[in-house]
């Protein structure tokens, strides 16, 4: 389905990243061990995540419903979280099971692609991203900072003109933009390599100069990229988080498992190198960028991205506990 392009004279809403009712990438799964508690924030809502002794991860509002103590200082007791102040205990659903008082607001959590994802809202509005299958091996990189707002980062991913000017790629055919559902926007295109750098030459060799890409924006907070290089396939998931220091980006990389397990880590390292070499070219361009939405809206693909983002729901002020 190709989305109808709205009039460019319409105002462009710019939602706050930390308030979007969407899935957020918190951390690698291995970063939260059984019995551990983690403080985490979307930038607009404080949460605590804990992994119960059974191995299940839960997410609750950060401040105890009793007197407001921060549960990040709490203790995991079995599959419950105990408040550090008066030892009220809450299960994964947020119910108070010891202390006799009000419960905590709970948030949906899944572990997928080697990462912990939490939904910013008590009710899941759409399923989390599901890239590939059990034959994919995933690995996460360390998060890094980008010195600009989140909107230009998302727009940059869908800016197909800059593929030529920054990344030395040329489109082989017209891109197809799909509004998969109210929370998911995807563009598909095929490109060829025009650059002569080391990573360019490797990409050209692997793909026979025919790179198929499916780029998907999930709820405004997660981007997934699936690349079909002919001889191999790879994937990337990028999570955006607004912090007091700026915008943080966490990347997860994937490649298909091989028949020789020892080769999987090599393939994953190559995939990580190719993706990071590609993305590194963007960082200097995005550094300090003041995004001009009106200028971006002159591009028909970016206009669809901006219209999609403007339609995304935010958590109301009374739903940020």
Image: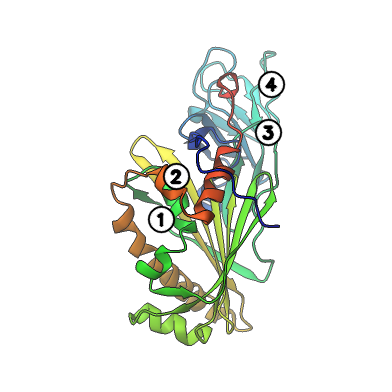
Looking at the rendered structure, the secondary structure element under dot 1 is: loop
Q: Is residue 112 above or below residue 248?
A: below
CB contact under 8 Å: marks 4 and 2:
no
Label 1 belongs to which residue?
142
Can residue 249 be seen in the rendering of this structure? no
The image shows residue 252 at horizontal and vertical percentages of: 51, 59
Label 3 belongs to which residue?
92
Looking at the rendered structure, the secondary structure element under dot 4 is: strand
Residue 24 lies in quadrant: top right
Label 1 – label 3 distance at C-alpha: 28 Å
**How many labels sit on residues?**
4
The image shows residue 307 at horizontal and vertical percentages of: 56, 43
Tell me the mark number nearer the camera, choosing from 2 and 3.
2
Label 4 – label 2 distance at C-alpha: 39 Å
Label 2 belongs to which residue?
151
Q: Mark 4 or 2 closer to N-term? A: 4
Label 4 – label 3 distance at C-alpha: 10 Å
Query: Quick one: quadrant of the C terminus?
Result: top right
CB contact under 8 Å: marks 2 and 3:
no
Q: Is residue 138 above or below residue 298?
A: below
Looking at the rendered structure, the secondary structure element under dot 3 is: loop
Question: Mark 4: few, some, or many residues within 10 Å (few <14, many ≥20)?
Answer: many
Q: Mark 1 or 3 closer to N-term? A: 3
Looking at the rendered structure, the secondary structure element under dot 2 is: helix
**Position of residue 259 in the picture relative to residue 193 (left or right):** right
The image shows residue 32 at horizontal and vertical percentages of: 53, 46
Question: Mark 2: few, some, or many residues within 10 Å (few <14, many ≥20)?
Answer: some
């Amino acid at each position: 389905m190709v989305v109808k392009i709205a009039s460019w004279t319409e105002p462009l809403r710019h939602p706050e990243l930390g308030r979007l009712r969407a899935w957020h990438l918190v951390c690698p799964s291995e970063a939260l061990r059984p019995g551990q508690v983690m403080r985490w924030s979307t930038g607009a809502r404080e949460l605590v995540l804990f992994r119960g002794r059974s191995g299940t991860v839960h997410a609750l509002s950060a401040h105890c419903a009793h007197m407001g103590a921060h549960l990040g200082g709490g203790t995991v007791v079995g599959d419950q979280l105990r408040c550090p102040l008066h030892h009220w205990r809450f299960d994964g659903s947020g119910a108070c099971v010891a202390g006799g008082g009000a419960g905590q607001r709970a948030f949906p959590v899944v572990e997928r692609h080697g990462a912990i994802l939490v939904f910013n809202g008590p009710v899941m509005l759409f399923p989390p991203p599901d890239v590939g299958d059990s034959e994919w091996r995933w690995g996460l990189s360390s998060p890094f900072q980008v010195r600009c707002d989140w909107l230009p980062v998302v727009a940059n991913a869908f800016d197909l003109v800059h593929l030529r000017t920054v990344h030395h790629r040329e489109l082989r055919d017209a891109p197809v933009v799909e509004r998969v559902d109210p929370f998911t926007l995807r563009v598909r295109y095929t490109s060829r390599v025009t650059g002569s750098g080391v990573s360019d030459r490797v990409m050209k060799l692997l793909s026979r100069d025919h790179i198929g890409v499916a780029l998907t924006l999930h709820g405004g907070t997660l981007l997934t990229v699936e690349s079909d290089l002919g001889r191999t396939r790879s994937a990337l998931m990028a999570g955006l988080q607004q912090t007091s220091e700026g915008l943080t980006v966490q990347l997860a990389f994937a490649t298909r498992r091989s028949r020789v397990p020892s080769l999987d880590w090599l393939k994953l390292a190559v995939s990580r190198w190719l993706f990071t070499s590609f993305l590194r070219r963007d960082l200097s361009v995005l550094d300090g960028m003041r995004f001009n939405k009106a200028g971006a809206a002159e591009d028909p693909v970016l206009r669809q991205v901006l219209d999609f983002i403007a339609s995304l729901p935010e958590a109301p002020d009374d739903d940020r506990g």
